[in-house]
Amino acid sequence: MTDRQAADLAALADLCTPWCVHVVATLRIADLIAAGATDLTDLAARAGCDAGSLDRVLRHLVSGGVFEQAAPGRFGLNEAAEAGRTPRPAAPDRRMPQPGRRRAGAQPPAAGTIRQ
C-alpha cells in the first residue's frame, strides 16, 4: 500500500469537529455574530452557555477554517460560518430537521454540555 492509498484514520475518526459544528448550530452562534455579538463574553451570555467552553469550541472550528478569530476572544464570520446561519424562509418547512433537534435519541444534546 502506498502513502497515497493509506487512509488517515485520525481524520476519519474525528468526532470533535462535527460535534462542534452541531453545538454552534444549536446555539445559533453564527446568527449572534451576524447580529453584532463578536466578543466571547457577549456571545456566551446571549447563547446562555459557558464562555470557556464556547471559546474552546470556536477556536477548534477556527483551526478548521470555520469562523475567524480577529483577536483573542473576538470571533467573526467567514464564508464557511455564513453557511451555518439560520435561513429565514417565508414559511418554515416542518419536514426539515431543526438544529438541536435530537434524532431518534441517538445522541445527547450537544449544546447542553456547555450551557450554564
Image (cartoon, rainbow, N blue to C red):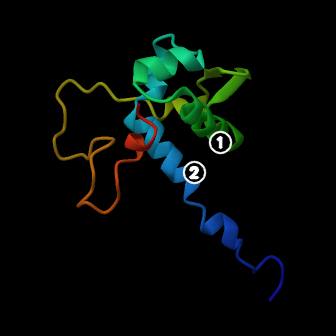
Looking at the rendered image, the quarter that the C terminus falls into is: top left
Image quarter of residue 77: top right
Q: Dot 1: what SS?
A: helix
Quarter occupied by residue 74: top right
Mark closest to the chain's N terminus, 2 or 1 = 2
Along the viewing direction, whichever of 8 and 109 lies nearer the viewer: 109
* Neighbours of disc 1 within 10 Å: few (<14), some (14-19), many (20+): some
Which residue carries the number 1 mark? 60
Q: Residues within 10 Å of mark 2 (few under 14, many from 20)?
A: some
- The image position of residue 76, as x and y in percent, is 61, 21
* Amino acid type at mark 1: His
Q: Is residue 2 above or below residue 110?
A: below
| Label 2 residue SS | helix
Which residue shows up at 67% across the image and 28% down it?
68
Q: Is residue 58 left or right of residue 8?
A: left
Residue under the point 27% across and 41% down: 98
The answer to whether 72 is drawn above or below residue 55 in the figure is above
Q: Image quarter for residue 25?
A: top left
The residue that mark 2 highlights is: 17
Tell me if label 2 and label 1 are in contact, CB under 8 Å. yes
Quadrant showing the N terminus: bottom right
